[in-house]
Amino acid sequence: MAQREGTSVQSEMISYDKIDPLPTENPFYFNEDSKINTIIKEKEKKFPWIHMSSFIIIIPLITFLMSMFYIGGMWNPVQKMENLKYVVVNEDVGCNIDSVCGAMKGQNLGEFYGKLDGQGVGTFEVIKGTMNDAEELINKHKYWMALHVPNNFTFGVLANLNNNTTKTEVVVNRIYDEARSFTTISFVKKAFEKLQIGFHTELITKIESLSTIMGDPKKFNPPFVIEGITYKDKNLYPVNVYGQYYCTYISFILIWIGTIATSLITHFVFPLESHWIEKKDATNAIVKTVSAKTITSVIVLFAISFIISIIPLCIGSMTIKKGYASVLFFFFFFSLSGIGVNNLLIHLFHFINFYLIACTFMILQIITCDGIIHHDLQYRFFRIGRAFPMYYATREIKYIYFESGKHNQTENILIIFVWVIVTQVASYYLYYLELNVKRAKYLKKNSISK
Protein backbone atom coordinates (compact mmCIF):
# COMPACT_ATOMS: atom_id res chain seq x y z
CA MET A 1 0.00 0.00 0.00
CA ALA A 2 2.80 2.36 0.95
CA GLN A 3 4.60 1.44 -2.29
CA ARG A 4 1.52 2.33 -4.35
CA GLU A 5 1.18 5.70 -2.62
CA GLY A 6 4.87 6.47 -3.27
CA THR A 7 4.45 5.56 -6.92
CA SER A 8 1.37 7.78 -7.16
CA VAL A 9 3.21 10.75 -5.64
CA GLN A 10 6.14 10.33 -8.03
CA SER A 11 3.83 10.22 -11.03
CA GLU A 12 2.25 13.52 -10.00
CA MET A 13 5.59 15.31 -9.57
CA ILE A 14 6.43 17.94 -12.23
CA SER A 15 9.86 18.38 -13.83
CA TYR A 16 10.06 22.17 -13.80
CA ASP A 17 13.28 22.25 -15.78
CA LYS A 18 11.37 20.96 -18.81
CA ILE A 19 8.57 23.48 -18.70
CA ASP A 20 8.78 26.28 -21.26
CA PRO A 21 7.49 29.48 -19.63
CA LEU A 22 6.56 30.75 -23.10
CA PRO A 23 5.33 27.78 -25.14
CA THR A 24 4.64 30.10 -28.11
CA GLU A 25 7.88 32.06 -27.97
CA ASN A 26 9.02 30.77 -31.38
CA PRO A 27 7.58 32.51 -34.46
CA PHE A 28 4.68 30.77 -36.19
CA TYR A 29 6.77 29.72 -39.19
CA PHE A 30 9.39 27.99 -36.98
CA ASN A 31 9.76 24.29 -37.80
CA GLU A 32 11.35 22.13 -35.14
CA ASP A 33 12.07 19.42 -37.70
CA SER A 34 13.57 21.70 -40.34
CA LYS A 35 16.89 20.77 -41.92
CA ILE A 36 18.92 23.38 -40.07
CA ASN A 37 17.39 22.46 -36.69
CA THR A 38 18.07 18.80 -37.38
CA ILE A 39 21.71 19.58 -38.11
CA ILE A 40 22.01 21.66 -34.93
CA LYS A 41 20.52 18.88 -32.81
CA GLU A 42 22.90 16.40 -34.36
CA LYS A 43 25.92 18.62 -33.67
CA GLU A 44 24.80 19.28 -30.08
CA LYS A 45 24.22 15.72 -28.97
CA LYS A 46 27.17 15.79 -26.60
CA PHE A 47 27.36 19.51 -25.81
CA PRO A 48 25.24 22.54 -26.91
CA TRP A 49 28.26 24.39 -28.27
CA ILE A 50 26.33 26.19 -31.06
CA HIS A 51 23.88 27.80 -28.65
CA MET A 52 26.61 28.57 -26.13
CA SER A 53 28.77 30.16 -28.82
CA SER A 54 25.89 32.31 -30.02
CA PHE A 55 25.28 33.56 -26.46
CA ILE A 56 28.97 34.35 -25.98
CA ILE A 57 29.02 36.31 -29.25
CA ILE A 58 25.62 38.02 -29.21
CA ILE A 59 25.64 39.41 -25.66
CA PRO A 60 29.02 41.22 -26.01
CA LEU A 61 27.92 42.40 -29.48
CA ILE A 62 24.74 43.95 -28.07
CA THR A 63 26.80 45.53 -25.29
CA PHE A 64 29.18 46.97 -27.88
CA LEU A 65 26.34 48.41 -29.95
CA MET A 66 24.61 49.99 -26.94
CA SER A 67 27.90 51.45 -25.70
CA MET A 68 28.66 52.84 -29.13
CA PHE A 69 25.23 54.43 -29.39
CA TYR A 70 25.12 55.89 -25.87
CA ILE A 71 28.76 56.82 -25.30
CA GLY A 72 30.02 57.31 -28.86
CA GLY A 73 27.04 59.40 -29.85
CA MET A 74 27.69 61.91 -27.07
CA TRP A 75 31.48 61.91 -26.95
CA ASN A 76 32.97 65.42 -27.03
CA PRO A 77 30.43 67.24 -29.25
CA VAL A 78 32.57 70.41 -29.07
CA GLN A 79 34.95 68.81 -31.60
CA LYS A 80 32.08 68.70 -34.08
CA MET A 81 31.18 72.37 -33.83
CA GLU A 82 32.87 73.08 -37.15
CA ASN A 83 29.78 71.44 -38.70
CA LEU A 84 27.54 74.26 -37.47
CA LYS A 85 26.48 77.11 -39.76
CA TYR A 86 25.96 80.76 -38.81
CA VAL A 87 24.97 83.79 -40.81
CA VAL A 88 25.86 87.48 -40.44
CA VAL A 89 23.03 89.58 -41.91
CA ASN A 90 24.75 92.87 -42.62
CA GLU A 91 22.49 95.92 -42.91
CA ASP A 92 25.37 98.31 -42.29
CA VAL A 93 25.53 101.21 -44.80
CA GLY A 94 29.17 101.98 -44.02
CA CYS A 95 30.56 105.46 -43.67
CA ASN A 96 30.66 107.94 -46.55
CA ILE A 97 30.50 111.33 -44.79
CA ASP A 98 33.81 113.14 -44.67
CA SER A 99 33.05 115.08 -41.47
CA VAL A 100 32.30 111.87 -39.59
CA CYS A 101 34.47 109.28 -41.30
CA GLY A 102 37.61 111.22 -42.01
CA ALA A 103 40.28 108.84 -43.22
CA MET A 104 37.90 105.87 -42.64
CA LYS A 105 35.53 106.98 -45.42
CA GLY A 106 34.24 104.06 -47.50
CA GLN A 107 34.69 101.46 -44.76
CA ASN A 108 31.86 99.01 -44.01
CA LEU A 109 32.82 97.47 -40.69
CA GLY A 110 29.88 95.05 -40.72
CA GLU A 111 31.74 93.03 -43.34
CA PHE A 112 34.52 92.54 -40.82
CA TYR A 113 32.39 89.82 -39.19
CA GLY A 114 33.52 87.55 -42.01
CA LYS A 115 36.71 87.18 -39.94
CA LEU A 116 34.76 84.88 -37.61
CA ASP A 117 34.81 82.17 -40.28
CA GLY A 118 37.47 79.52 -39.85
CA GLN A 119 37.78 79.89 -36.07
CA GLY A 120 36.91 76.25 -35.40
CA VAL A 121 33.35 76.71 -34.15
CA GLY A 122 31.52 76.64 -37.46
CA THR A 123 31.05 78.37 -40.79
CA PHE A 124 30.11 82.07 -40.89
CA GLU A 125 28.48 83.51 -43.99
CA VAL A 126 28.02 87.28 -44.47
CA ILE A 127 25.00 88.38 -46.49
CA LYS A 128 23.07 91.60 -47.03
CA GLY A 129 19.67 91.82 -45.37
CA THR A 130 17.43 93.11 -42.62
CA MET A 131 16.39 91.96 -39.17
CA ASN A 132 13.35 90.22 -40.71
CA ASP A 133 15.63 88.32 -43.08
CA ALA A 134 17.74 87.15 -40.14
CA GLU A 135 14.66 85.92 -38.24
CA GLU A 136 13.33 84.12 -41.30
CA LEU A 137 16.59 82.23 -41.77
CA ILE A 138 16.51 81.07 -38.14
CA ASN A 139 12.81 80.21 -38.39
CA LYS A 140 13.55 77.85 -41.25
CA HIS A 141 16.53 76.32 -39.41
CA LYS A 142 18.97 77.32 -42.14
CA TYR A 143 21.52 78.46 -39.54
CA TRP A 144 22.08 77.98 -35.82
CA MET A 145 22.55 81.66 -35.06
CA ALA A 146 22.14 84.88 -37.02
CA LEU A 147 23.99 88.11 -36.22
CA HIS A 148 22.12 91.17 -37.41
CA VAL A 149 24.45 94.15 -37.96
CA PRO A 150 22.36 97.38 -37.94
CA ASN A 151 22.68 100.11 -40.58
CA ASN A 152 24.52 102.45 -38.18
CA PHE A 153 27.16 99.95 -37.08
CA THR A 154 30.14 101.66 -38.75
CA PHE A 155 29.01 105.11 -37.57
CA GLY A 156 28.69 103.83 -34.01
CA VAL A 157 32.12 102.21 -33.95
CA LEU A 158 33.83 105.28 -35.47
CA ALA A 159 32.05 107.56 -33.03
CA ASN A 160 34.00 105.84 -30.28
CA LEU A 161 37.20 106.38 -32.24
CA ASN A 162 36.61 110.10 -32.69
CA ASN A 163 35.31 110.75 -29.19
CA ASN A 164 37.71 109.79 -26.40
CA THR A 165 35.43 110.73 -23.51
CA THR A 166 31.95 109.25 -23.97
CA LYS A 167 31.08 105.78 -25.19
CA THR A 168 28.59 105.45 -28.04
CA GLU A 169 26.76 102.14 -27.66
CA VAL A 170 27.06 99.78 -30.61
CA VAL A 171 24.40 97.06 -30.72
CA VAL A 172 24.40 93.80 -32.69
CA ASN A 173 21.47 91.38 -32.42
CA ARG A 174 21.94 87.63 -31.90
CA ILE A 175 18.95 85.65 -33.17
CA TYR A 176 18.50 81.93 -32.43
CA ASP A 177 15.89 79.26 -31.77
CA GLU A 178 16.45 77.66 -28.38
CA ALA A 179 13.65 75.12 -28.83
CA ARG A 180 15.33 73.65 -31.90
CA SER A 181 18.02 72.09 -29.70
CA PHE A 182 18.51 73.45 -26.20
CA THR A 183 21.86 71.70 -25.68
CA THR A 184 23.28 72.70 -29.06
CA ILE A 185 22.29 76.35 -28.62
CA SER A 186 24.01 76.34 -25.22
CA PHE A 187 27.24 75.22 -26.93
CA VAL A 188 26.78 77.87 -29.64
CA LYS A 189 26.30 80.71 -27.15
CA LYS A 190 29.33 79.73 -25.09
CA ALA A 191 31.50 79.43 -28.20
CA PHE A 192 30.39 82.83 -29.48
CA GLU A 193 31.13 84.51 -26.16
CA LYS A 194 34.75 83.46 -26.62
CA LEU A 195 34.78 84.51 -30.26
CA GLN A 196 33.41 87.99 -29.63
CA ILE A 197 36.30 88.83 -27.27
CA GLY A 198 38.87 88.04 -29.93
CA PHE A 199 36.78 89.74 -32.61
CA HIS A 200 36.53 92.97 -30.59
CA THR A 201 40.27 93.06 -29.98
CA GLU A 202 41.04 92.43 -33.65
CA LEU A 203 38.53 95.09 -34.78
CA ILE A 204 40.07 97.75 -32.52
CA THR A 205 43.63 96.86 -33.58
CA LYS A 206 42.76 96.96 -37.28
CA ILE A 207 40.97 100.32 -37.18
CA GLU A 208 43.61 102.04 -35.06
CA SER A 209 46.34 100.69 -37.35
CA LEU A 210 44.41 101.79 -40.43
CA SER A 211 43.97 105.31 -39.07
CA THR A 212 47.70 105.51 -38.44
CA ILE A 213 48.54 104.33 -41.96
CA MET A 214 46.19 106.93 -43.44
CA GLY A 215 47.94 109.70 -41.54
CA ASP A 216 45.18 110.38 -39.03
CA PRO A 217 46.13 108.27 -35.97
CA LYS A 218 43.37 107.87 -33.40
CA LYS A 219 42.56 105.71 -30.40
CA PHE A 220 39.27 104.30 -29.13
CA ASN A 221 37.93 105.61 -25.87
CA PRO A 222 38.56 103.35 -22.85
CA PRO A 223 34.89 102.51 -22.12
CA PHE A 224 34.45 101.09 -25.64
CA VAL A 225 37.74 99.20 -25.43
CA ILE A 226 36.73 97.64 -22.12
CA GLU A 227 33.02 97.01 -22.65
CA GLY A 228 33.04 96.37 -26.38
CA ILE A 229 30.04 95.83 -28.64
CA THR A 230 26.68 95.13 -26.98
CA TYR A 231 25.07 91.91 -28.15
CA LYS A 232 21.33 91.63 -27.58
CA ASP A 233 19.75 88.19 -27.73
CA LYS A 234 16.48 87.53 -29.53
CA ASN A 235 15.36 84.02 -28.71
CA LEU A 236 12.54 83.30 -31.15
CA TYR A 237 11.24 80.22 -29.33
CA PRO A 238 12.45 80.19 -25.73
CA VAL A 239 12.46 77.15 -23.46
CA ASN A 240 11.31 78.48 -20.10
CA VAL A 241 11.61 75.16 -18.23
CA TYR A 242 14.34 72.68 -19.14
CA GLY A 243 12.16 69.80 -17.98
CA GLN A 244 9.74 70.55 -20.81
CA TYR A 245 12.53 70.34 -23.38
CA TYR A 246 13.55 67.05 -21.76
CA CYS A 247 9.98 65.86 -22.39
CA THR A 248 10.37 66.47 -26.14
CA TYR A 249 12.30 63.23 -26.47
CA ILE A 250 11.94 61.32 -23.19
CA SER A 251 8.17 61.15 -23.71
CA PHE A 252 8.64 59.18 -26.91
CA ILE A 253 11.09 56.82 -25.23
CA LEU A 254 8.44 56.07 -22.60
CA ILE A 255 5.80 55.59 -25.28
CA TRP A 256 8.09 53.22 -27.17
CA ILE A 257 8.71 51.18 -24.03
CA GLY A 258 4.93 51.03 -23.62
CA THR A 259 4.53 49.69 -27.15
CA ILE A 260 7.14 46.98 -26.50
CA ALA A 261 5.25 45.93 -23.35
CA THR A 262 1.92 46.00 -25.20
CA SER A 263 3.31 43.83 -27.99
CA LEU A 264 4.68 41.30 -25.52
CA ILE A 265 1.50 41.04 -23.47
CA THR A 266 -0.95 40.88 -26.39
CA HIS A 267 1.22 38.34 -28.19
CA PHE A 268 2.08 35.88 -25.44
CA VAL A 269 -0.68 36.16 -22.84
CA PHE A 270 -3.69 37.51 -24.74
CA PRO A 271 -6.58 35.46 -23.26
CA LEU A 272 -9.11 36.11 -26.02
CA GLU A 273 -6.93 34.44 -28.64
CA SER A 274 -7.54 30.93 -27.36
CA HIS A 275 -11.14 31.88 -26.58
CA TRP A 276 -11.99 31.81 -30.30
CA ILE A 277 -9.06 30.13 -32.06
CA GLU A 278 -9.33 27.00 -29.93
CA LYS A 279 -13.06 26.54 -30.30
CA LYS A 280 -14.12 24.21 -33.06
CA ASP A 281 -17.54 25.76 -33.57
CA ALA A 282 -16.37 29.40 -33.39
CA THR A 283 -17.39 31.43 -36.44
CA ASN A 284 -15.05 34.09 -37.87
CA ALA A 285 -12.54 33.16 -35.18
CA ILE A 286 -9.62 35.00 -36.81
CA VAL A 287 -11.61 38.18 -37.45
CA LYS A 288 -12.87 38.24 -33.86
CA THR A 289 -9.38 37.64 -32.45
CA VAL A 290 -7.76 40.34 -34.59
CA SER A 291 -10.52 42.80 -33.73
CA ALA A 292 -10.26 42.09 -30.02
CA LYS A 293 -6.49 42.49 -30.05
CA THR A 294 -6.77 45.74 -32.00
CA ILE A 295 -9.31 47.23 -29.60
CA THR A 296 -7.26 46.14 -26.59
CA SER A 297 -4.07 47.64 -28.03
CA VAL A 298 -5.79 50.93 -28.89
CA ILE A 299 -7.19 51.28 -25.37
CA VAL A 300 -3.82 50.50 -23.78
CA LEU A 301 -1.89 52.85 -26.09
CA PHE A 302 -4.34 55.69 -25.56
CA ALA A 303 -4.04 55.22 -21.80
CA ILE A 304 -0.23 55.27 -22.07
CA SER A 305 -0.36 58.44 -24.20
CA PHE A 306 -2.71 60.12 -21.75
CA ILE A 307 -0.55 59.30 -18.71
CA ILE A 308 2.68 60.47 -20.35
CA SER A 309 1.09 63.67 -21.65
CA ILE A 310 -0.64 64.61 -18.38
CA ILE A 311 2.24 64.04 -15.94
CA PRO A 312 4.23 67.17 -16.99
CA LEU A 313 1.11 69.27 -16.42
CA CYS A 314 0.78 67.83 -12.93
CA ILE A 315 4.41 68.61 -12.09
CA GLY A 316 4.48 72.28 -13.09
CA SER A 317 3.71 74.93 -15.66
CA MET A 318 4.61 74.37 -19.29
CA THR A 319 4.18 75.95 -22.70
CA ILE A 320 1.80 74.27 -25.15
CA LYS A 321 1.24 76.65 -28.05
CA LYS A 322 -1.05 74.26 -29.95
CA GLY A 323 -3.08 73.03 -27.00
CA TYR A 324 -3.13 69.89 -24.89
CA ALA A 325 -5.37 67.96 -27.30
CA SER A 326 -2.66 68.23 -29.97
CA VAL A 327 -0.12 66.72 -27.57
CA LEU A 328 -2.37 63.83 -26.56
CA PHE A 329 -3.41 62.82 -30.05
CA PHE A 330 0.08 63.21 -31.47
CA PHE A 331 1.46 60.94 -28.73
CA PHE A 332 -1.20 58.38 -29.64
CA PHE A 333 -0.43 58.78 -33.34
CA PHE A 334 3.27 58.13 -32.67
CA SER A 335 2.43 55.09 -30.53
CA LEU A 336 0.79 53.50 -33.58
CA SER A 337 4.17 53.46 -35.33
CA GLY A 338 5.75 51.91 -32.23
CA ILE A 339 3.15 49.16 -31.91
CA GLY A 340 3.41 48.50 -35.64
CA VAL A 341 7.19 48.07 -35.51
CA ASN A 342 7.17 45.89 -32.40
CA ASN A 343 4.24 43.72 -33.53
CA LEU A 344 6.09 43.15 -36.78
CA LEU A 345 9.29 42.17 -34.97
CA ILE A 346 7.51 39.90 -32.52
CA HIS A 347 6.00 37.88 -35.38
CA LEU A 348 9.39 37.55 -37.07
CA PHE A 349 11.70 36.64 -34.21
CA HIS A 350 12.07 34.33 -31.25
CA PHE A 351 11.18 35.99 -27.93
CA ILE A 352 14.78 36.67 -26.81
CA ASN A 353 15.80 37.87 -30.28
CA PHE A 354 12.78 40.16 -30.42
CA TYR A 355 13.60 41.69 -27.06
CA LEU A 356 17.24 42.35 -27.97
CA ILE A 357 16.38 43.80 -31.39
CA ALA A 358 13.54 45.94 -30.05
CA CYS A 359 15.69 47.41 -27.26
CA THR A 360 18.65 48.03 -29.57
CA PHE A 361 16.42 49.78 -32.11
CA MET A 362 14.88 51.92 -29.36
CA ILE A 363 18.32 52.97 -28.06
CA LEU A 364 19.45 53.80 -31.59
CA GLN A 365 16.41 56.05 -31.97
CA ILE A 366 17.05 57.75 -28.63
CA ILE A 367 20.56 58.82 -29.54
CA THR A 368 19.73 59.82 -33.14
CA CYS A 369 16.45 61.70 -32.65
CA ASP A 370 18.12 65.11 -32.09
CA GLY A 371 16.69 65.19 -28.58
CA ILE A 372 19.75 64.95 -26.37
CA ILE A 373 22.00 66.68 -28.86
CA HIS A 374 21.66 67.61 -32.53
CA HIS A 375 23.22 65.31 -35.10
CA ASP A 376 25.35 68.23 -36.37
CA LEU A 377 27.43 67.62 -33.24
CA GLN A 378 27.61 63.87 -33.75
CA TYR A 379 29.43 61.55 -36.14
CA ARG A 380 27.81 61.20 -39.57
CA PHE A 381 26.60 57.69 -38.73
CA PHE A 382 24.06 59.11 -36.29
CA ARG A 383 22.22 60.89 -39.09
CA ILE A 384 20.62 57.51 -39.65
CA GLY A 385 18.01 58.82 -37.21
CA ARG A 386 16.40 60.69 -40.10
CA ALA A 387 15.01 57.37 -41.27
CA PHE A 388 13.25 56.62 -37.95
CA PRO A 389 9.90 57.85 -36.57
CA MET A 390 11.27 59.16 -33.25
CA TYR A 391 13.37 61.79 -35.06
CA TYR A 392 10.27 63.27 -36.70
CA ALA A 393 8.18 62.92 -33.54
CA THR A 394 10.77 64.93 -31.59
CA ARG A 395 10.70 67.67 -34.23
CA GLU A 396 6.91 67.77 -34.33
CA ILE A 397 6.40 67.99 -30.56
CA LYS A 398 8.74 71.00 -30.50
CA TYR A 399 6.33 72.68 -32.90
CA ILE A 400 3.31 71.70 -30.79
CA TYR A 401 4.98 72.93 -27.59
CA PHE A 402 6.94 75.97 -28.78
CA GLU A 403 5.92 76.54 -32.45
CA SER A 404 9.52 75.89 -33.51
CA GLY A 405 10.04 74.29 -36.93
CA LYS A 406 6.64 74.87 -38.51
CA HIS A 407 8.15 74.29 -41.97
CA ASN A 408 8.89 70.66 -40.99
CA GLN A 409 5.34 69.78 -39.93
CA THR A 410 4.16 68.19 -43.19
CA GLU A 411 7.29 66.07 -43.47
CA ASN A 412 7.04 65.00 -39.82
CA ILE A 413 3.44 63.80 -40.07
CA LEU A 414 3.91 62.18 -43.47
CA ILE A 415 6.95 60.08 -42.54
CA ILE A 416 5.44 58.87 -39.25
CA PHE A 417 2.25 58.04 -41.17
CA VAL A 418 4.27 55.94 -43.63
CA TRP A 419 5.84 54.05 -40.72
CA VAL A 420 2.37 53.45 -39.26
CA ILE A 421 0.85 52.18 -42.50
CA VAL A 422 3.74 49.96 -43.61
CA THR A 423 4.40 48.34 -40.23
CA GLN A 424 0.73 47.92 -39.35
CA VAL A 425 -0.14 46.27 -42.66
CA ALA A 426 2.87 43.95 -42.43
CA SER A 427 2.22 43.03 -38.79
CA TYR A 428 -1.50 42.38 -39.40
CA TYR A 429 -0.67 40.15 -42.35
CA LEU A 430 1.81 38.12 -40.28
CA TYR A 431 -0.69 37.91 -37.43
CA TYR A 432 -3.31 36.61 -39.86
CA LEU A 433 -0.88 33.91 -41.04
CA GLU A 434 -0.04 33.00 -37.44
CA LEU A 435 -3.69 32.65 -36.46
CA ASN A 436 -4.31 30.50 -39.52
CA VAL A 437 -1.50 28.17 -38.46
CA LYS A 438 -2.77 28.00 -34.87
CA ARG A 439 -6.35 27.44 -35.99
CA ALA A 440 -5.34 24.68 -38.40
CA LYS A 441 -3.23 22.93 -35.75
CA TYR A 442 -6.10 23.05 -33.26
CA LEU A 443 -8.67 21.72 -35.71
CA LYS A 444 -6.32 18.97 -36.84
CA LYS A 445 -5.54 17.94 -33.27
CA ASN A 446 -9.21 18.05 -32.33
CA SER A 447 -10.24 15.89 -35.30
CA ILE A 448 -7.52 13.31 -34.56
CA SER A 449 -8.47 13.01 -30.91
CA LYS A 450 -12.03 12.19 -31.91
Image (tube, helix red, strand yellow):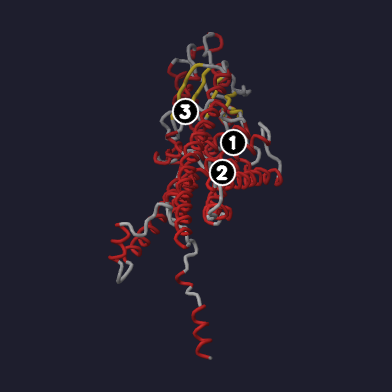
The residue that label 1 is drawn on is 397
Q: State which tag comes first along the sequence, 3 or 1.
A: 3
Q: How many marks?
A: 3
* Local secondary structure at mark 3: helix
Disc 1 from disc 2: Cα separation: 10 Å
Q: Is residue 348 above or below residue 178?
A: below
Disc 3 from disc 2: Cα separation: 47 Å
* Local secondary structure at mark 2: helix
Q: Quick one: label 2, few (<14), some, or many (20+) residues within 10 Å?
A: many
**Residue 174 position in % (x across, y down):** 57, 28
* Local secondary structure at mark 1: helix
Mark 3 or 2, closer to the camera: 2
Q: Are marks 1 and 2 in contact (CB under 8 Å)?
A: yes
Left or right of 20? Residue 244 is: right
Mark 3 or 1, closer to the camera: 1
Residue 67 in view in this figure = no
The dot on residue 52 is none
In-front residue for pair 306/391: 306
Q: State which tag comes first along the sequence, 1 or 2.
A: 2
Left or right of 162? Residue 210 is: left
**Residue 91 position in % (x across, y down):** 54, 16
**Residue 283 position in % (x across, y down):** 56, 47
In-front residue for pair 33/149: 33
The residue that label 2 is drawn on is 252
The residue that label 3 is drawn on is 202
